[in-house]
Structure formats: C-alpha cells, structure tokens
Amino acid sequence: MECVFGLVGKGFALVVADASAVHSILLHKSNEDKIMILDSHKLMGASGEAGDRAQFTEYIQKNVALYQFRNGIPLTTAAAANFTRGELATALRKSPYFVNIILAGYDKETGPSLYYIDYIASMHKVDKAAFGYGSYFSLAMMDRHYHSNMTLEEAIDLVDKCIIEIRSRLVVAPPNFIIKIVDQDGAREYGWRKSINDDHISAA
C-alpha cells in the first residue's frame, strides 16, 4: 500500500513518501527512505518493486553525479527528468523497471519544479502529483486545498491533512511517512510523521 506524493510551493518543492518495506502480507520495516537526494538541489521519490526502486534510483543518482563530474556543471531539473524518462523508455523495451517517480528540484533560473514520471516512461511537469493507493486520497485533498504560491507552513499543513486522510481511509495504511524539501538552500530532510517506531528493531 505504497504512497508517494509531492507539490510545488512558493520557492520550494517537497516530496512525501511512506516508509514501509512490504512483501506480500508482511511488513519488514517501517523506516525505509524512499526519497533519494540526487544532488544538492534534486529529490527523487519512488514507488514500485523494492529491487527496481533501489537499483534504478541509485543508477540515476550516479549518472547525474557522473555528468557533473565530467562537465563541471550540474544537470537542471528538467534535464534530469528527461534523462530519467529516457532510461525508463530504453529499459521498457528490454527489461522494464516497475518504478514510478516524482522528481523535484530547484534551479536558480527557473525556481522549483516537479515532474511526474511513471513506469511506462510518460513524463509531465506538474504542480502536484501522487502515486500508489494513497494517491486516491492525497490527490483528492490536494485538489481541494492546494493553491499556487503556497507557503511552507501551508504546504506542511496540507501534507499532514493528506497523511491523516490516508491513515483513516486506506484499509492497510502505511504507519510512517518521511518528508523532504528542496529550495534555494538545497535538498534536505524536513521531518517524519510516525505512528510506530521500529528504530530499536533495526539497530538490533
């Protein structure tokens, strides 16, 4: 019952993902970070098969870093999104990755942006996006409450509304969520929304 969603606000973009690692009817852990920091000003939230998600997001992260190393300049968010879409399209005809992506970034020239990329390599630049079973509820809440130029406080309040709705309406709802933000100061973790804590289990 995965859920990844994101939105663009005034001077920032944020991505939220559930933190559950699930196989069949088993919950293996509830502190899995599904939002990868691609570089200093880009985030990639991913949902899908665990192996595809980990392998593909790491592959994109390393290639984005390789481009910057070779050329001395980072990829723009649009360029990184197009590269990601191209790699998914290439793999689609060979050995497809079952992974859906929300890519957020901040560029000095254009500001924050958000890209929706699904597993069949369709891509759209959007103001808000969601994947997974939780998208039925998070998209509904964002359609109702989202507006352009939201402040960070308004956006976090909307995120909390979405999480509460997912937890109360989805029959097998993820207990924990992670929130990451990207703005002119860079990409970073904003916080967690936890209903259970298994840190002691992971450390054991």
Image (cartoon, grey):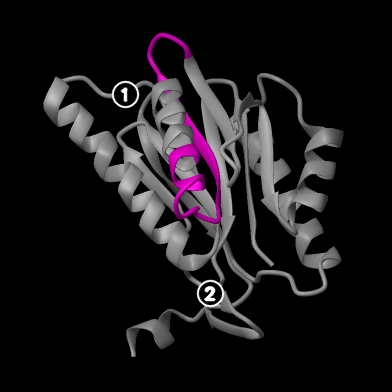
The answer to whether residue 13 is magenta is no
Q: Nearer the viewer, residue 13 or 92?
A: 92
Q: Earlier in the sequence, mark 1 or mark 2?
A: 2
Q: Amino acid at mark 2?
A: Ser
Can you give x and y, in whole percent of width and height, for residue 62 in the image? 25, 44
Q: State the residue at coordinates (47%, 16%).
A: 111
Q: Is residue 47 above or below residue 30?
A: above
Residue 75: mark in rendering: 1
Q: Amino acid at mark 1?
A: Leu
Marks 1/2: CA distance?
Answer: 32 Å
Discs 1/2, front: 1
Q: Residues within 10 Å of mark 2 (few under 14, many from 20)?
A: many
The residue tagged with tag 2: helix, strand or loop?
loop
Instruction: Please give the range of residues in magenta.
Output: 89-110
In the rendered image, the quadrant that contains the N terminus is bottom right
Left or right for 141, reference 197 = right
Q: State the residue at coordinates (70%, 20%).
A: 148
Can you give x and y, in whole percent of width and height, for residue 130 in the image? 68, 44
Give the number of callouts.
2
Left or right for 47, reference 38 = right
The answer to whether residue 7 shows anywhere in this view is: yes
Can you give x and y, in whole percent of width and height, for residue 93 in the image? 50, 45
Can you give x and y, in whole percent of width and height, for residue 114 in the image? 56, 29
Question: Residue 127 occupies which quadrant of the picture?
Answer: top right
Q: State the residue at coordinates (76%, 48%).
A: 138
Residue 30: mark in rendering: 2
